[in-house]
Image: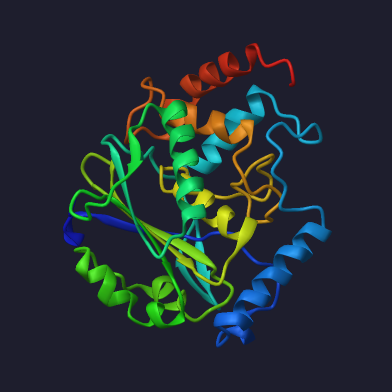
């Protein structure tokens, strides 16, 4: 599906925020960058992060916490800053989500990437009711997942142009060279219906293992309408401290709430609060873990 840029609002979503001084590493690529990302993953693991727990006992939550976290993740836009320049300010936002089937088209992905995406897609479909699957037909696609090495990143504008979209923007321009951005996503929102029309996910090929999977997971899930991250959101991938890198039960509940048919695109927090609280309470009623 092709959406004219003039008819869409465009957002950028940032992934894991690496708490290392990486600005001076901007020129790294290939084996050097691969080694750097591997060392970052190991450092995170040494700090007790990069967890894949589904039901972590050290991060309990109740209906109040779940409702509050949903409001922060789904009803506030994610702020972005490059160097000292604020690109997007965090602010209140309406519910945005997909209302059409999602067709994933991939470039530069491996067999392991495909297995991960297929498993994740089935999980998302079961949680949201969305139809989501990979396609080989680029004309049918509305979510593009592009994994690129240094040479391919140099011509990313050209590749994205062939998909019928314009890359551009400060964060998109910074992604190819800056090591601090291992992956980003860009989404298009219809300004009238406030539904998602397409998404482009960009991942550096120098990423491997769990770090690479975490990028695939977080960017795809955020591209469903859960755009924001918060330092107090846990147990969750919607937290830039990289404590959790796969969907937790908490995150599954966020997706179920977002795609509950009692909510509609365009609704703001004051309209959804009682509905979200009702859904959250019901979801947790029979969850003995919490």
The residue shown at (26%, 76%) is 158
> Number of numbered discs present?
0
Where residue 273 appears, as percent x and y from the top left, is 49, 26
Question: Which residue is situated farthest in the front direction here?
Answer: 111
Residue 248 picture quarter: top right
Where residue 105 appears, as percent x and y from the top left, is 31, 53
Q: Is residue 42 above or below residue 68?
A: below
Q: In this view, does 58 lie above or below 37?
A: above
Where residue 89 appears, as percent x and y from the top left, is 47, 60
> How is colour applied across the structure in the image?
rainbow
Side (left or right) of 160 relative to 256: left
Side (left or right) of 244 relative to 138: right
Q: Is residue 77 visible?
A: no
Question: Which residue is situated farthest in the top direction here?
Answer: 286
Where residue 138 appears, as percent x and y from the top left, is 22, 55
The residue shown at (76%, 64%) is 42
Q: Name the quarter where the C terminus is drawn.
A: top right
Residue 246 picture quarter: top right
Front residue of 78/283: it is 283
Front residue of 79/252: it is 252
Q: In this view, does 150 lie above or below 54?
A: below
The residue shown at (75%, 53%) is 49
Side (left or right) of 168 relative to 4: right
Q: Is residue 69 visible?
A: yes
Q: In this view, does 119 lie above or below 45?
A: above
Front residue of 61/33: it is 33
């Amino acid at each position: 599906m092709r959406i004219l840029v003039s008819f869409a609002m465009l957002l950028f979503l940032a992934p894991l925020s690496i708490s290392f001084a990486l600005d001076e590493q901007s020129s790294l690529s290939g084996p050097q960058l691969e080694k750097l990302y591997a060392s970052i993953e190991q450092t995170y693991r040494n700090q007790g992060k990069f967890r894949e727990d589904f039901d972590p006992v050290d991060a309990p939550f109740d209906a109040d916490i779940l409702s509050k976290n949903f409001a922060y993740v789904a009803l506030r836009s994610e702020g972005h800053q490059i160097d000292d320049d604020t690109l997007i300010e965090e602010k209140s936002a309406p519910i945005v989500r997909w209302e059409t089937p999602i067709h994933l088209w991939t470039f530069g992905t491996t067999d392991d990437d495909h297995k991960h995406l297929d498993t994740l897609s089935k999980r998302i479909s079961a949680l949201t009711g969305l139809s989501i699957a990979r396609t080989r037909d680029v004309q049918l696609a509305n979510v593009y997942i592009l994994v690129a090495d240094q040479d391919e990143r140099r011509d990313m504008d050209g590749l994205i142009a062939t998909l019928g979209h314009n890359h551009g923007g400060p964060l998109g321009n910074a992604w190819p060279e800056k090591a601090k951005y291992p992956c980003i996503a860009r989404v298009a929102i219809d300004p009238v219906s406030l539904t998602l029309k397409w998404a482009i996910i960009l991942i550096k090929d120098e990423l491997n293992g769990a770090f690479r999977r975490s990028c695939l997971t977080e960017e795809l899930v955020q591209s469903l309408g859960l755009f924001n991250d918060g330092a107090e959101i846990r147990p969750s991938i919607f937290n830039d401290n990289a404590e959790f890198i796969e969907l937790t039960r908490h995150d599954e509940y966020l997706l179920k709430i977002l795609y509950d048919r009692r909510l509609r695109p365009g609704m703001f927090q004051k309209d959804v609060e009682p509905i979200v609280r009702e859904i959250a309470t019901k979801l947790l009623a029979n969850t003995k873990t919490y």
